[in-house]
Image (cartoon, rainbow, N blue to C red):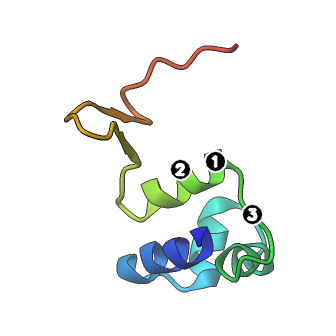
Amino acid sequence: MIGKLLKVLRSNKGYNQTELANLLNIAQTTLSGYETNYSNPNFETIENIAELCDYEIIFRKKGTKEEITTKNINRVDV
């Protein structure tokens, strides 16, 4: 499922796989693996792809308007 979403983000931005892979400093085959669900990217990679494609990851609490984004959360080591 995440692969299809990553492909949509990339396509909407107008990047081909090679262009986006170069921006991420990963191999094009790695990005292809993510998009085909052959392998799964870690959350940081997903966040980087979203950022490069002009998207923001938002977590919205069900039933409320409370939102947390990767930009407004206080990151602390647990």
Q: What residue is rendered at 61% in x and 82% in y? A: 17
Q: Secondary structure at mark 1?
A: helix
- Circle number at residue 47: 2
From this view, report whether residue 6 is shown above or below residue 78: below
Residue 16 is drawn in which quadrant?
A: bottom right
Q: Is residue 43 left or right of residue 74?
A: right
Residue neighbourhood size for the residue with mark 3, other residues' Cα within 10 Å, grouped as few (<14), some (14–19), many (≥20): some
Q: Return the residue at label 3.
A: 40
Q: Secondary structure at mark 2?
A: helix
Mark count: 3
* x then y, percent, for residue 4: 55, 79
Q: What residue is rendered at 70% in x and 72% in y? A: 34
* x then y, percent, for residue 61: 33, 36
Q: Residue furthest front?
A: 63
* x then y, percent, for residue 48: 55, 52
* x then y, percent, for residue 28: 73, 79
Q: What residue is rendered at 39% in x and 33% in y? A: 71
Q: Return the residue at label 1.
A: 43
Q: Would you say the residues marked 1 and 2 are in contact, meaning their CB atoms lie under 8 Å apart? A: yes
Q: Quadrant of the C terminus?
A: top right
Residue neighbourhood size for the residue with mark 2, other residues' Cα within 10 Å, grouped as few (<14), some (14–19), many (≥20): some
Of the image marks 2 and 3, the number of the one nearer the N terminus: 3
- What is the distance, in whole Å, between disc 3 and disc 1 at their CAs? 9 Å
Q: What residue is rendered at 72% in x and 76% in y? A: 37
- What is the distance, in whole Å, between disc 1 and disc 2 at their CAs? 6 Å
Residue neighbourhood size for the residue with mark 1, other residues' Cα within 10 Å, grouped as few (<14), some (14–19), many (≥20): few
Amino acid found under the numbered disc labelled 3: Asn
